[in-house]
Image (cartoon, rainbow, N blue to C red):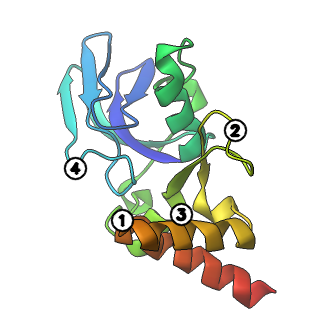
Amino acid sequence: MKLLGKANNRIAIASISRHDYMGIAGMFVDGGQNGTSQGGGYCRHGGEGKIVWFEVPQAFAELYNDYRDSHLLPRKYGMWELKDVKLLSPEEYPDTNSFEWQAENAIWGTNGIDGTQRTKYVHLKDCSKEHLEKIVELCESRGAKEISKFAKYWLDKANIEC
């Protein structure tokens, strides 16, 4: 996942969701990641270090589940050693306003097939065709047009591959 955050000569930090203030070593970030379903529509960066785009091995759903569970468990992500990330050149910066970027990082909260499991966020792109059909049905009944368009996109791709 490509993240916008701050870095110094030792660590990189990023905010995963709106109201996710992350601060350490005189740096802070807040507001989530633009172009994601959990972004706050703003990004605040302050303190020492420089604003950077960097890439981490974790996918957005894994980062978001970690953020969401942080009131129950210690967080694993939000801060990375600089040696564990790839700093991106301007040519590698993502277009977070593009449909493709947003579809690639769109997540959905699921409680499992029977609805009894604790909510876990998954990427729409990783959902089965049947799951995507149910998501589209639910979104349309609730008027959730934004997430529905991404579910339809992945459903169309699943139908082409069949």
Q: Are marks 2 and 4 in contact (CB under 8 Å)?
A: no
Nearer to the camera, 96 or 137: 137
Which label number is shown at residue 116?
A: 2
- Disc 2 from disc 1: Cα separation: 37 Å
Q: Earlier in the sequence, mark 2 or mark 1?
A: 1
- Disc 3 from disc 2: Cα separation: 27 Å
Q: Is residue 115 above or below residue 153?
A: above
- Disc 1 from disc 4: Cα separation: 15 Å
Labels 2, 4: front one: 2
- Disc 2 from disc 4: Cα separation: 32 Å
Q: What is the quadrant of residue 51 in the picture?
A: top left
Badge 4 local density, few (<14 within 10 Å), some, or many (20+)?
some
- Horizontally, is 71 left or right of 130 in the view? left
Q: What is the quadrant of residue 118 in the picture?
A: top right
Q: Earlier in the sequence, mark 3 or mark 4?
A: 4
Q: Position of residue 63 (x, y in %)?
A: 53, 36
> In the rendered image, which residue does mark 4 sit on?
41
Q: Is residue 105 above or below residue 7?
A: below
Q: Position of residue 150 (x, y in %)?
A: 49, 71
> In the rendered image, which residue does mark 1 sit on?
95
> In the rendered image, which residue does mark 3 sit on?
104
- Horizontally, is 118 left or right of 77 in the view? right
Labels 1, 4: front one: 4
- Disc 1 from disc 3: Cα separation: 12 Å
